[in-house]
Image (spheres, rainbow, N blue to C red):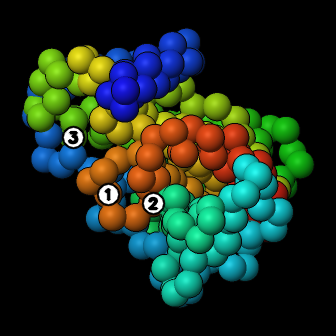
Amino acid sequence: MLRLYHVLLGGVLVLLLPLGIKVVSPRLSRTNGMPEQPHASSLASKSNQGNLWKSILDQTASPTGWQVAACDGNTSVLCVSANGKRLGTVEIAVYPLEKQQNFQNLLRQAGIEPGKNIDYQNPQYKTQVSTALNAWVNDYYTFLSKERQGSYGNRIAFSTHPPQQAQVGKLQGLSYGFTGVKVQGGVQEHHLGYVAFDGKNLYVIRTAFNPSLKTGKFERLENLAIFEPYLRAIAANLRLP
């Protein structure tokens, strides 16, 4: 019965994935886990200065009986639990713009000079930021597709989700994600993410169903699916910028 459930759930995920999805059948991969963001060697996250969730978390929407709170410790991880048992975690990382040459270039291509004063209410600026973030996500998808080539073979169909506009605090950001579905039934991995930019820092929120990950994941795919709309509401109510 459990295997049948995952087969059905995998089928539902495939049917619900937005139109315009990109699907590839990779051949060889260096990792089965979630890869780093594009040009990871140039990223210097400052979220290791303490658990950032403690200062930015506002309203915490959750299913009945579930609890959402910043995890203990200095790592920027959000804990989701029920009945005293942890169901999953959500990571947030902050990347200073000065250390991201690639995103600086994407901003310039969109018509924004990095470091200039910004107006969050300016429609033109919002459009330009959205263009840069879309390019960032597409770069990430290109990176992912190369990373997944190989170990999946013909056993798993890898797909990326079209980026969608999403509110991240007061910032206009994007949601994105990707999924690996087993041809014989079941889901190998399912990742969700949000990205936003405040003029100085790039904010990346992510979680997943992926057994190979140590954190930033849910142990059960069905719990991640239940929590997904609540995470969107939480992101919208963050104290950002």
- Which residue is nearer to you in this view: 30 or 199? 30
Distance in Å between CA atoms under marks 2 and 3: 19 Å
Asked if marks 2 and 1 touch (Cβ < 8 Å), the reply is: yes
Front disc: 2 or 3? 2
Q: Is residue 9 above or below residue 208?
A: above
Crowding at dot 3, Cα within 10 Å, few <14 / some 14-19 / many 20+, comes out as many
- Which residue is nearer to you in this view: 136 or 82? 82
Q: From this viewpoint, is residue 150 visible?
A: yes
Q: Residue flagged by tag 3: what amino acid is it?
A: Glu
**Which mark is first along the chain, 3 or 2?**
3
Residue pointed to by mark 1? 213
Q: Residue flagged by tag 1: what amino acid is it?
A: Leu
Distance in Å between CA atoms under marks 3 and 1: 16 Å
Going by the image, does 10 lie left or right of 186? Answer: right
Residue pointed to by mark 2? 216
Q: From this viewpoint, is residue 198 visible?
A: no
* Disc 2 secondary structure class: loop
Q: Residue flagged by tag 2: what amino acid is it?
A: Gly
Residue pointed to by mark 3? 147
Quarter of the image with the C terminus in it = bottom right
Residue extending farthest to the right is 121
x 73%, y 72%: residue: 56
Q: Is residue 87 above or below residue 126?
A: below
